[in-house]
Image (tube, rainbow, N blue to C red):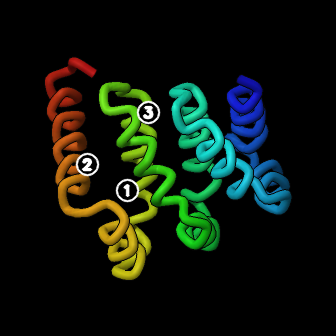
Amino acid sequence: PLQVVGCLALEALVRGSEEGLEQVSAAGGVALALDALRANAEVPSVQVGGCNLLQILVEPRPEARAELLELGGSEAILAALRLHTVNVAVRAGAFKLLCTLARDGAHARARLLESAGLGLIAEVLNFLVDVEESQELGTE
């Protein structure tokens, strides 16, 4: 889909470029990526591309993480997890993004917990432990 191409193009523009990151952010990059996730909830490639783009946009910028939460990003990320239960790429991107959002303190974590519930939080933790163990064993 066109949204995949768009996410990849924006990701290439912002990756490693402070200027590109500022331009895409100023143009509403967080909202655009979130719109792509919502409009293509059942398309795994858009979910992966959207989560990856959002990760790049929000990781270095606390205000972008707050924006994503305010726009209901946690719900879109959780929808991706619920729809793509066996797609490792979708789940990895979504889990990483949730962890990035959670590092902004108690308010952010409470909002994620409210959206996700304890079951999904436990699933995230189990996924992270599995990844860490496979990396230690050299299988990842």
Q: Amino acid at mark 3?
A: Val
Image-based side of 70 in relation to 98, left or right: right
Q: Nearer the viewer, residue 47 or 107?
A: 47
Q: Are marks 1 and 3 in contact (CB under 8 Å)?
A: no
Q: Nearer the viewer, residue 108 or 40?
A: 40
Q: Are marks 1 and 2 in contact (CB under 8 Å)?
A: yes
Compare marks 1 and 2 and give the one earlier in the sequence: 1
Numbered tag placed on residue 90 in the rendering: 3
What residue appears at the point 72 percent right and 32 percent down from the top-left corner? Answer: 3
Q: Position of residue 20 (x, y in %)?
A: 81, 48
Callout 2: SS = helix
What residue appears at the point 19 percent right and 62 percent down from the top-left corner? Answer: 118
Q: For the residues marked 2 and 3, what is the alpha-carbon distance in whole angstroms?
A: 13 Å
Q: Position of residue 100 (x, y in %)?
A: 44, 58
| In the rendered image, the vertical position of residue 30 relative to residue 14, given as above or below | below
Near mark 3 (Cα within 10 A), the count class, few <14, some 14-19 or many ≥20, is: many
Q: Amino acid at mark 2?
A: Val
Q: Nearer the viewer, mark 1 or mark 2?
A: 2
Q: Position of residue 128 (x, y in %)?
A: 24, 43
Q: For the residues marked 1 and 2, what is the alpha-carbon distance in whole angstroms?
A: 9 Å
Image-based side of 123 in relation to 85, left or right: left
Q: Which residue is mark 2?
A: 124
Q: Position of residue 93 (x, y in %)?
A: 45, 39
Q: Amino acid at mark 1?
A: Cys
What residue appears at the point 41 percent right and 51 percent down from the top-left corner? Answer: 78
Q: Where the N terminus falls, by quadrant?
A: top right
What residue appears at the point 23 percent right and 29 percent down from the top-left corner? Answer: 135
